[in-house]
Image (cartoon, rainbow, N blue to C red):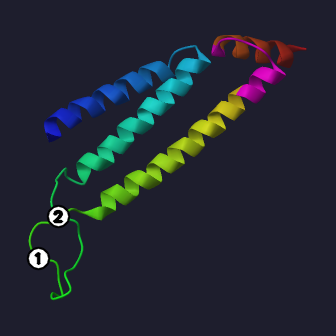
Amino acid sequence: MEFLLAIVIGVLYASGLYLMMQQSIVKLVIGLGLLGHGAHLLIFTIGRVNRDVAPIIPADSKYLTGAFADPLPQALILTAIVIGFGVLAFTLVLIRETNRAAPAITIAQHEQDSGDVSRT
């Protein structure tokens, strides 16, 4: 199971980085999302995938015994999803305001427009 997740993580990272290096702003945002999903799966895989019992201490015991699921990776993934959503929303607003100030379709056109402004 971990080997399959490692392959999926590699594909998500590779496709996210590939899309981020393209000249389209839409592909940049999609690549950022894929990169974030790859990071979530990486944290999930590092925490070891298991379906053991919940980490709740029984009333008659003082310590956990036996195999139990680790809640820390789940909490980290949940936090990373919220942070990733915030970064994606910020990126979309930043792109919208940039396009409103200087309309262009690709990143190269933005570079050309900013180069023309600095020359004058």
Q: Quadrant of the N terminus?
A: top left
Secondary structure at badge 1 equals loop
Disc 2 element: loop
The residue sitting at 47% across, 19% down in the picture is 19
Left or right of 31: which side holds 103?
A: right
Residue at the extreme left of the image, as rendered: 66
- Label 1 is placed on what type of residue? Thr
Q: Which class describes the residues within 10 Å of circle 2: few (<14), some (14-19), or many (20+)?
A: few
x, y (%) of residue 119? 85, 14
- In the visual, does 92 lie left or right of 32? right
At label 1, counting other C-alpha atoms closer than 10 Å, the crowd grade (few under 14, some 14-19, many 20 or more) is few
Quadrant holding the C terminus: top right
- Residue 9's spot in the image, x, y percent? 29, 34
Q: Nearer the viewer, mark 1 or mark 2?
A: 2
71 magenta-colored? no
Picture disc at residue 65:
1
Q: Residue furthest right?
A: 120
Query: From what the image shows, is residue 58 above or below residue 29?
Result: below
Please name the residue shown 19% across and 81% down the image.
Answer: 58
Q: CA distance from mark 1 to mark 2?
A: 11 Å
* Residue at image mark 2: 53
Q: Residue at x 64, y 16 (%)?
A: 107
On screen, 63 above or below 80?
below
Chain part drawn in magenta: 96-107
Instruction: Please provide percent x and percent y for residue 77.
Output: 38, 51
